[in-house]
Amino acid sequence: MTSSTDYHADSTPGTTSNMELRIREYQLEMLNESLKRNLIVVMPTGTGKTQVAILRILADIDKGNSDKFVWLLCPTVALSEQQYIQYATVFLPSGAEDKAIWDNALSGIKIAVSTYQVLYDALSHGFVKLSQMSLLIFDEAHHCKKDHVANKIMQVHYHKQHQSGVQNLPKILGLTASPILSDLSSLEIVESNLGSICKTPRQYYAQLLQFTNRPLILPRLPTYTIPNCSVKAPILEKLCGILSSEDEVPSSSKMKSKQLKHIRRFMQTSESINQELGIWAATEYMRKSIMHFKESMRMGAEKTNISNYGKDFAMEILTRLGKLQDCSPAIQPEEISPMCQCLLDELSKAYREGFCGLVFVTQRATVLALKWLIENHPLTSHLFTCGTFIGMSTTQYSKTELGNLHDIRNQTETLEKFRQGSLNLIITTDALEEGIDVPACNTVLNFNCQLSLKSFIQRRGRARRENSQFIIIMEDESGPRYLKRLEMEEIELVQKLQNAERRQIPANELDFDKYERISLSLDIDRTGAQLIMREAVGYLYNFCSKLPAQLYVSNKPLFTYERNNYGRFRAVVKLPSNLDPSLQSFSSSRSWSRLKYAREDAALQAYKALYQAGLVNDYLVPTQVSDHLEGDIIFRSHYSIQNQLDPWQDIALLWKLDSQLYAHNLRIIRPEEDEIHLHMILPTQLDTTIHIPLFIDYCTTYTAILTPGHPITTDISLCQQVTNLIFQSVYRDHCSRRNLDYAFLLVPELEETKLIEFLERYSGSVSLTELLNQEATPSALGLLRSHTRPSRPLLVEPWVAGECFLPDELSISSFDAKVKYMTNRRNFLSHGNLAAGKSTNCEARIGLEANVKSMSVRDFFVDKLPSMFAQVALFTPSISHEVEVYMIAQILRQELSLRSVTPWQRIDLLAIAIRPTSIEHRATFRLLAFIGDAFMKYLFAMQLFLHHHLWHEGLLSSLKQRNLSDAGLAHAIHQSGLGKFLISKHLNGKRWVPPLVSGIEPASNEARQRSIGAATLADMTKAVVGAAFTDGGLNQAAACASVMFPKLKSWNASSLHDGTYSKTRPENAVASTAIVDMEELLGYTFTDKSLAVESMTHPSCTGLVQTTSYRRLSFLGASVLEWIVVSYLHRHAQVMNPQRMQSLKSAFTNNTFLTFIAITFHQVREQNHIDVDDEHNVHKNVTTCSIRLWDFLRLHSDALSTELSDFVQKSSEKADAIKHELWEQRFYPWVRLRALGDMRVLSDIIQSIFGAVFIDSQATLASCDALAEKLGIVPLLEHFISHQITTDHPKDTLQAILPGRKVSYQICVDKVHPGTLRCSALADSSEIASVEGQMNDEVIKMQAAETAVRLLRKGFALSETS
């Protein structure tokens, strides 16, 4: 016979005063045991362990020790929150890292609730002491093992203090349904770790059993009759094939391992699902995972400059799958595995009214796959409403983890719905075995999970309603035998501990409007930000105010209301059309008693959607550019980057390793002189021909040509001696006869015998007397050196008759010769190193000007080495510097080639691109940077547009501008480590000495830094991309850009080709008559008609939820048009300099020019009219009309419509004059164009049309080229190029005509005619020209500049400016 006792608490924890606990005898038995010793209470789930803990807490509080408090520990945050609700006390979350915060939180409390980790951290930091506690309660005490944080609390703090003699430690109370984890041997371990003993009711054990409902255990085995259960899903088969072909591509094992990490893990999971559940589930899981992964990667592409090789490789592999087909809704028997079919059969049999069940599976991925299968299978789809649960830990995989589709933010809602009954089945992992408050179930299924004794007891304990069942799906015949063994172990455990299960009390909920208004909110766990319902309207207005402003457009949200038959309200809010159609209309989640509440609810739902779309950040403010930049990035004007890469360090190492040597043919072409032929020997191979201009003087340029190397075997010692002999001719003071380990060798021959002969013949010197006796020719003479006065050596010029008189007798002491001193120059790479002013004597070569001079025979001796080798020594600093640059470029090429399909051919362009400060190659560098800049803007605009289809134009523009700014590009180079390739060291010929292997410092682990301006780093990035485009076209440039700027992805257009982007477009767009007419006007037929509609939809169109405004397409189209113009100019780069190209680009892409195009572009069509006169005669009349692009514009602003009509009417005559100037007068009319006025809507639709055609044609530039041709942009551009018509801005032209003069403009208002302005163009305060007119400030300044230029070119106003 059972009995119970009503315990009325006079003093209760927290705020739950007067809480009544219904106490049973077995609970009092456990209470009494806990008062005697440290105790672990072992009772089944649902039998009241929590009540025992409450009784123990109350007993402790009744002692009246005001200085101490009770601390309840739970393994998870979810359980901590659950216990916090039940105890109604102080819950301590993690993150408090200040002692004052802890002292304040614990001041005056009686009970604290937290996870194990929170207490462990607090004890470790000294924020809390065990001596402050009277009782320490461990919920789910069986976790106290091994490295679990619960065990750390005991071992690191409790036991350590206990052993040191501390007396005032808290008592221990443990709570668990199963004190073991695997087998019975773990029982003693848990007891030892907690310093407690496990107890279960003994005296009142019969009463305990009466409150325990045991389910019927039903083991089930599948019937293997379904065919083709081992066949793989089609997507899986295709992916396996792609990876097999990828394995054949040669790559380093380390790189291959990085690349395959994500894709292989995904494959393993998919194969497991294929085997466990069958083809249908595997296909659905892979399809949804791939789509989610692609979308997440595109959304996050611009957030970091750090490349993730695995994810990027997975993205590239998955795009090869093409468009993924949806799973068939009709699931075939062969698409289900036998075990899964068994599960579905048992589920359908177990279903009854009031069904409440759990399905336990092993893998997280299986949870979702099984949910989708149950929801779609005909046996179960109409019976079950499913949820999923995988745990509440925030340590989850990244959103861009392939195969990770779970959102833990929705799991609390899942449990709540399960408690309320709106969900009747949850598929879960072991996360719901214990600790989480789940209602009693009548059916629990264990699907293909290996059960331990603990999991068997815990999962069975979930099925504790009357007549419940625990169904165990087993793989083979060994399953039932193993189940019998578990039951025997449980009997043994019961005999030892008399184990039972616990029960939890679900919390009650209120359902009143005021309560709902308070409880409804948007909570962000990561930041703690919260938006409650009553503040949502203000937040929404603030968001809309941050959208890009535009005339005639209201960005305010628009609310409408409906009232139902019961007098309750629902609200609908309309957001501006600049947003995606899916974000333009939202309704309140329910009806409300007050209109105000309905309005707030609708605003909250809208704000939630904006947050999910990424337009609101984790702090619940409108997303800013900084939210998509890494960490706390601060863009700077200068960056500290690695020192310039020194390839000679690698060369020195190769010399020391006796590596293979390569000989490179070196030719020095000398106009009107013989070529010099040598070999440069290096322990590495240069694989490209290097042309090096050597500027001798303003009239003479030599050319050094170094060809690709070929392997050789030679006597290094001989080569070093020959090289030393050549260097000694010029660098005698810096060359040692002992140390000859030069970093490179220069030899005239490769054969050993010829090298020996060279050394024997040319080593040393000879007296001038002896040389004259041999009647040597000047070309064979070496350098002349003085015995008496060491100075620069002399060169003997070739003489003609009469210029040199050889002595008739050997006794003569002097003779006359044409000689000159050898130059001090060592840098021949630019004209800038020549003396100021052009030399009038163009006969000089390597020395100063030659003169006929009387020479004392005895004062001079002559090098045996011919002087042409001295010239080689002179040129060596210039040649070696260029070789160094090319070696750096060659290393960079290897980095860039990792992503590029097309091999680099023009390494000379790359060598120029990495030298942004080089004077010699400035024009070519600027051209490459000009191309690269436009190309990167085009690529990044396309990427942002496709990856973030929910983002408005303002956010896209800001992110593009910030990332592609000088600071943004420089920061990418700074992070990527590619800054080491930037050449900032210029050749200092006077300090150059022949490099020795022994003198080259080895590479250091601590890289030295240098400060480089952001603009310089950005220019290098653009130039390298421009070089890639010039070398290999679009694909190579795109691959190169993704390396130089990792936020740019090589797969940025993949969503166009795999169907992902098309799914974001509005459906069922009808080809109306207006669209057909517009297509005829443009000469282009849209596949997606909604793009044509969007391109003509003005932002003033609100309420048209089928489409967004043209602002996004205009953003994309602006970059596309710019690239079309730049690529066209690139094809004519041979006849233009970069400055001219920049001027042309600005002239043909600015808004006023595009406005002019929109006004003038039209098509004349005939219209037939049928008239019937009074006599009923039929007359057919044919008239013509002009169809213009702006005729198709959709807008909802009467004011804009009126102004647009007036503008076009007034501008028609001006447009004719502009057209005449453009085509006939060969003049770019900056003033007339700007005087047209600022009608931005017209230039916007030109840009949006380019964006629409680009997207509709699957990013085909040829279609956009054709559109530019049709609009007249390309023909006009070609006209300006072929006729060399200038397009420089008048103000720029005026400043160029007056270099060094300060040009300014002075504007004043005519006092007689107040509407008239007068503007004077001034040079150093002197007036050049003045104009008057009724125009704005900008236009009149341009006209004044234009007038001044015209006067100056005609010779007027010169005296005034002199």
Image (cartoon, rainbow, N blue to C red):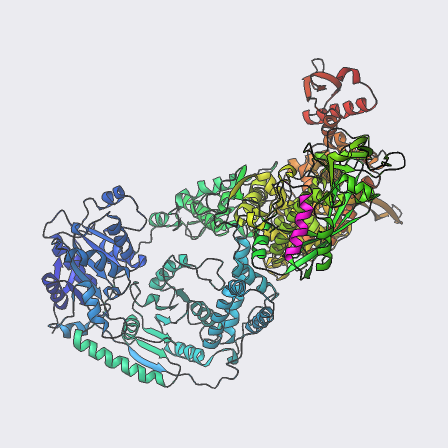
Residue 1219 shown in magenta: no
Q: Residue furthest top?
A: 1312
User: x, y (%) of residue 1299?
Assistant: 72, 25
Q: So how many labels did they put on this image? A: 0
Q: Is residue 835 above or below residue 109?
A: above
Q: Quadrant of the C terminus?
A: top right
Q: Quadrant of the N terminus?
A: bottom left
Left or right of 82 on screen, residue 794: right
User: x, y (%) of residue 1083?
Assistant: 77, 52
Residue 722 shown in magenta: yes
Left or right of 1124 on screen, residue 541: left
Q: Is residue 1080 above or below residue 1334?
A: below
Whether residue 1188 is visible to the viewer of this picture, yes or no, is: no
Whether residue 873 is visible to the viewer of this picture, yes or no, is: yes
Q: Residue furthest front?
A: 811
Nearest the eye: 251 or 763: 763
User: x, y (%) of residue 1077?
Assistant: 75, 51
Nearest the eye: 991 or 758: 758
Q: Residue drawn at (30%, 56%), measured in percent from left and top?
A: 509
Which residues are the magenta region?
Answer: 716-732
Nearest the eye: 1050 or 777: 777
User: x, y (%) of residue 779?
Assistant: 81, 43
Prevailing SS of the magenta stretch: helix
Left or right of 1261 on screen, residue 70: left
Q: Is residue 900 above or below residue 229?
A: above
Nearest the eye: 21 or 938: 938
Quarter residue 425 falls in: bottom left
